[in-house]
Image (tube, grey):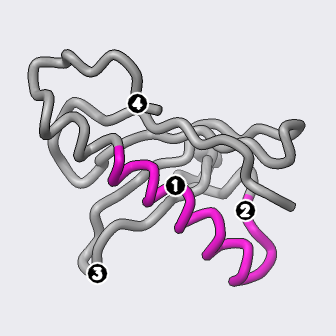
Amino acid sequence: MEITEVKVFPAKDGGRLKAYATIVFDNCFIIRDLKIIEGNKGLFVSMPSRKRKDGTFRDIVHPLNSEMRRLIEDGVVNEYNKVAELEENHPTGEVENYE
């Protein structure tokens, strides 16, 4: 399985939530609403989740092994870093194309 596209949408609040992301695998499977969060040990990717009746959250989709988790995190965080750098260099939103 290959990551064929990653889109990052920076969060506006400036808190621990840094951005939302969408990822595409093999040009045929998309996962939306991943979250890029600033944790105590750096950035990490949180999978899309749903709040249950008891108030806890459960992931809707998630990788089944650490290799796939690493592949997803690396792809999403690398794209976030590119977007963040572009926004830092163009703070007024003058960036025409992130690619």
Q: Are marks 1 and 2 in contact (CB under 8 Å)?
A: no
Q: Residues within 10 Å of mark 2 (few under 14, many from 20)?
A: some
Please indicate whether residue 1 sits to the left or right of residue 9 in the image.
right
Q: Main secondary structure of the magenta part?
A: helix
Q: Residue at x 61, y 49 (%)?
A: 49
Instruction: Please tell me whether residue 78 belongs to the stretch shown in magenta.
Output: yes
Which residues, given as a range, are shown in magenta?
62-82
Task: Using the image as rendered, state which of residue 60 and residue 85 is in the foreground.
Answer: 85
Name the residue beneath numbered marker 2.
62
Quarter-wise, where is residue 95 in the image?
A: top left
Name the residue beneath numbered marker 1.
76
Instruction: Give the Cα distance between marks 1 and 2.
Output: 14 Å
Q: Tag 2: residue type? A: His
Instruction: Give the Cα distance between marks 3 and 4.
Output: 27 Å
Q: Residues within 10 Å of mark 3 (few under 14, many from 20)?
A: few
Q: Are marks 1 and 4 in contact (CB under 8 Å)?
A: no
Residue 60 position in % (x across, y down) = 73, 50
Q: Tag 4: residue type? A: Tyr
Q: Tag 3: residue type? A: Lys
